[in-house]
Every structure is written in structure tokens, then in C-alpha cells.
Image (tube, grey):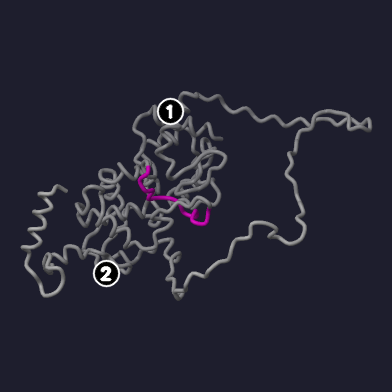
């Protein structure tokens, strides 16, 4: 700050009206000014304005105003927060804290979207848009199954967040930090230290050799693996890039786990709804009972426009419009039997 600016500020402070108490700066906020800032929403829904919205509308608003930072499916772009998935990870070594896995109150979601989003244009959303985006976030996290469910100030209380019981009030009394002694640096464990196990490498297919007693040890031939159908590796690479759009919900590979969507290993030519321990939508269960098999033709039709192919699907992905993109995606999935 320049010297002249400092003098100007000092002069303004000296000229400010003096009050009986305080520093004589500013004035008391008017009721209207206080009301403009009083926009918090309580866990029981107190403070919610009137409005309504569903996931179908919310998907469009989200794509326009949120996806650039949070990804098409809430997977997060760059270092922006992930919004969907992460269920069952909080006790793992790599917890994924999202709206579906971590946030205890729906009011926090509504309040945060309303108060701070979109980034750089906070509080520009209409109330109906906030309800719609919130409904879409619930849908992406499998908290609601119906994309036409109308979330409103009246239906708000019907929603219970999965981690609502994961938070509790710490009612322990405040206690002083206990002084600790010097840490033990040597001879801390009494008695001898015994090594009870050793790591070793097991060779499951031994070589043919003499064991020293004139008895030959014959190598056991491994059963040959069936040859996988030849793959178009150029298409596989293209599909791998496209699969980034799917990674927030689905996984492939040896360490794949079910997330918001099931693992996709071996899905090509596999009966629908075949992944164990995954909660499929009613629509997909019905299709599976009807004998649906994910042939390349069926996958192509589904990937083109999931919601049109299977009404009621939880799949929020809009689809791959280009035939060559769908072919690449299917080839990539074929590469993970």
C-alpha cells in the first residue's frame, strides 16, 4: 500500500462517526441484509425454499454447469472433488469420500450447491435447478432409483443418506494432554526375540531332476490356457481412452471391484445381471430374467443410448453416438475376459 493511500484510509477512519461502543467503524446491518446471508439449511430441512426438480432435469443442468469440474458422472476432473461412488471404502486404506459414501445429511448437499456452486458464479442457480441437481446427485449415487422422483421441500425428508449413522457427537469432557516420558530407543522388549516364520518363493512347476536318491522328479505340465480371440489392438487403445468416461462407476482388470456399477470383466457374450454381489436395477433384473445376453450387437445398441434401450436403467451415461466409438469400447471390454 502506497503512503498516499495509507493517509487516505487513515483520514477516512478518523472522519467516521464515533459510536458509544466499538471502534466507530461501519454500521449495524439491516434486517434485509441479514436475510440475504441467512440461507443455511438445517438437517431436518428447515430453511428450504419452495421448489422441485428431478434427476432427468438435473442431468441436463449438471452437464451444462457442473461436469466441467466434477466430470460427466461425478468422477472428478483433475483435482476437483469426486461426487459419486466410493460406497464401502471408508474403512479401507484408500477411502473415497463422496456424497454417496460419506456425507451424512442431504441438507449439506442442497446448501453447498445453493451457496457455493457453480464455481465462479455462486448463487446463480434457481431453486428448482438446485433441487434438480441434488436429485441427479442422489441418482448417480444409487440413493434413489427413480430418475423421475420429484425432490422438493416437501419430499426432502423422505431421503436418508447412507452414512447418516457414521457421524456422532463427541461428548467426552475436555481433558488436558498428558505428559509423556522419553520414548524407549533400545532394549524395549524383554526376553529373546524369536523368528517364527520366513518368506519363501514356491516354484509350482518344478523342473525335472534327480532328487539325490535316484528318483526322477517330473515337471508337471500346466494345462494350456484357451486362446483368446484375436483383438484389434488399435481399437483396444481407442476404447481404453473412451473408458475414462466409465471409470467413475465401472472397473475392469484383475483388481476390479463393484462400484456404482458392476465390474465389466467378461461382459461380452455374458448373460445380463451375472455379476455376484451387485444390486442391479429392476429394469436390468427383468431383462436378465428375459434371457438378455450381452452380445456385441446388444452392447452396441445399449451403448448408443442406454436410457432408450432400457427404460429404468440406473445408467446415467448419455451414450456413445459414433459407431466407431462403440466398436472401440466393445473391443476394449473384450480385452478383459
- The picture places residue 86, in percent across and down from the top left corner, at 45, 51
Check disc 2 and report its element: helix, strand or loop.
loop
- The picture places residue 79, in percent across and down from the top left corner, at 37, 44
User: In the image, is 118 to the left or to the right of 20?
Assistant: right
User: In the image, is 227 to the left or to the right of 149?
Assistant: right
Q: Which residue is mark 1?
A: 238
Q: Residue at x 16, y 48 (%)?
A: 1
Q: Quadrant of residue 202?
A: top right
Sequence-wise, which precedes: disc 1 or disc 2?
A: 2
- On the question of residue 299 being in view, the answer is yes
CA separation in Å, label 1 and label 2: 49 Å
Q: Residue at x 26, y 50 (%)?
A: 57
Check disc 1 and report its element: helix, strand or loop.
helix
Q: Quadrant of residue 220?
A: top right
Q: Which residue is mark 2?
A: 46
Q: Residue at x 41, y 55 (%)?
A: 100
Q: Is residue 81 magenta?
A: yes
Q: Front-most of 2 and 55?
A: 2
Q: Is residue 60 above or below residue 295?
A: below
Amino acid at each position: 500500500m502506497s503512503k498516499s493511500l495509507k493517509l487516505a484510509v487513515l483520514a477516512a477512519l478518523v472522519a467516521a462517526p464515533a459510536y458509544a461502543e466499538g471502534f466507530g467503524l461501519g454500521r449495524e446491518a439491516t434486517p434485509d441484509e441479514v436475510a440475504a446471508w441467512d440461507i443455511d439449511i438445517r438437517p431436518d430441512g428447515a430453511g428450504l425454499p419452495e421448489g422441485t426438480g428431478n434427476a432427468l432435469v438435473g442431468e441436463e443442468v449438471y452437464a451444462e454447469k457442473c461436469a466441467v469440474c466434477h466430470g460427466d458422472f461425478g468422477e472428478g476432473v483433475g483435482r476437483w472433488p469426486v461426487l459419486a461412488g466410493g460406497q464401502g471404502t471408508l474403512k479401507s486404506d484408500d477411502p473415497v469420500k463422496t456424497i454417496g459414501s460419506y456425507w451424512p445429511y442431504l441438507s449439506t448437499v442442497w446448501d453447498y450447491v445453493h451457496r457455493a456452486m457453480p464455481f465462479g458464479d455462486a448463487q446463480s442457480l434457481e431453486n428448482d435447478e438446485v433441487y434438480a441437481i441434488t436429485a441427479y446427485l442422489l441418482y448417480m449415487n444409487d440413493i434413489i432409483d427413480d430418475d423421475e422422483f420429484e425432490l422438493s421441500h416437501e419430499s426432502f425428508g423422505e431421503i436418508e443418506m447412507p452414512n447418516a449413522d457414521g457421524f456422532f457427537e463427541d461428548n467426552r469432557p475436555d481433558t488436558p494432554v498428558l505428559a509423556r516420558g522419553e520414548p524407549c530407543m533400545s532394549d524395549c522388549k524383554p526376553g529373546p526375540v524369536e523368528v517364527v516364520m520366513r518368506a519363501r518363493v514356491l516354484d509350482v512347476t518344478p523342473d525335472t531332476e534327480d532328487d539325490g536318491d535316484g528318483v526322477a522328479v517330473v515337471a508337471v505340465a500346466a494345462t494350456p490356457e484357451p486362446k483368446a480371440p484375436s483383438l484389434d489392438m488399435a481399437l483396444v487403445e481407442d476404447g481404453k481412452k473412451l473408458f475414462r468416461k466409465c471409470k467413475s462407476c465401472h472397473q475392469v482388470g484383475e483388481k476390479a471391484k463393484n462400484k456404482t456399477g458392476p465390474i465389466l470383466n467378461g461382459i461380452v457374450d455374458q448373460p445380463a445381471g451375472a455379476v455376484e454381489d451387485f444390486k442391479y436395477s429392476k429394469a436390468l433384473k427383468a431383462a436378465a430374467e428375459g434371457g438378455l445376453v450381452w452380445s456385441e450387437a446388444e452392447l452396441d445398441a445399449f451403448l448408443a443410448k442406454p436410457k432408450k434401450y432400457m427404460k429404468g436403467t440406473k445408467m446415467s451415461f448419455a451414450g456413445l453416438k459414433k459407431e466407431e466409438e462403440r466398436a472401440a469400447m466393445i473391443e476394449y471390454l473384450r480385452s478383459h475376459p
